[in-house]
Amino acid sequence: GDSVTQMEGPVTLSEEAFLTINCTYTATGYPSLFWYVQYPGEGLQLLLKATKADDKGSNKGFEATYRKETTSFHLEKGSVQVSDSAVYFCALNRDDKIIFGKGTRLHILP
Amino acid sequence: DAGITQSPRHKVTETGTPVTLRCHQTENHRYMYWYRQDPGHGLRLIHYSYGVKDTDKGEVSDGYSVSRSKTEDFLLTLESATSSQTSVYFCAISLDRGSNQPQHFGDGTRLSIL
């Protein structure tokens, strides 16, 4: 069945460092892909999405490109801030149901 | 703010007791979902609803039932709670069907079964 695999955390970076969180998926066809972010004590918030191959989703300085050839959707940010500390989930939408990766916890040190 | 309220936000109860969690939305969205979040598992779908009295099972539905008698409310019931159902439960809503539709989440209910 469909699945999402993302890098295990926690990931610890210094402020202003470059961030990459890897995400690969297994699915038939062309699902839509999402990144969600979860801040402590809160629910998940949609960060960005891409609906077809080569689409680039972007929001709040984060970017991810839908790569069909490598079945990947890696999350990147050029300069992270302490406020970016959270858990990040990669996900795909299949038949109106979202399949999530296990999440990657990100710690940003001042 | 997607207009989703989950209640209660925290609950502690004993094994064998029934528990009902409520999800209330003010967006008039047709599609609603219940997930549980556990360390090492991410979020897993329990049940979902495509409209009033139209519900179906998700990936981890055993031990759970749901009801949706009004568009705005989606109830999750643990008929006889077990310690394995200790988790954080999230409700989500979606405006429409289609693979490009995101879901919007409530703030969760932390449930502890002793």
Image (tube, grey):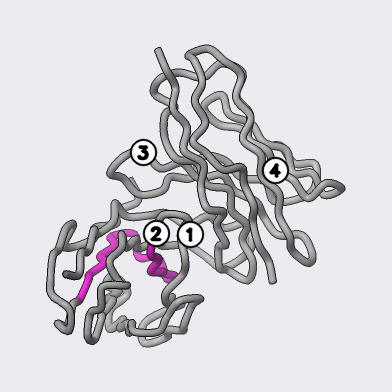
Q: Which residue is mark 4?
A: A73
- Mark 2 and mark 1 in contact? Answer it, CB < 8 Å: yes
Q: Tell me which amino acid carries mark 4.
A: Phe
The residue sitting at 73% across, 60% down in the picture is: A26
Q: CA distance from mark 2 to mark 1?
A: 5 Å
Q: For the C terminus of chain B, which image quadrant?
A: bottom left
Q: Tell me which amino acid carries mark 1.
A: His
Q: Which sits in the foreground, B100 or A72?
A: A72
Q: Which residue is mark 3?
A: A39
Q: Is residue B86 left or right of residue A17?
A: left
The earlier-in-sequence mark between 3 and 4 is 3
Residue B45: x %, y % from top left: 46, 69
Residue B27 in magenta?
A: yes
Q: Which residue is mark 2?
A: B38
Q: Which residue is mark 1?
A: B41
Magenta region: B20-36
Q: CA distance from mark 1 to mark 4?
A: 20 Å
Q: Tell me which amino acid carries mark 3.
A: Tyr
Q: CA distance from mark 3 to mark 4?
A: 21 Å
Element class at badge 3: loop
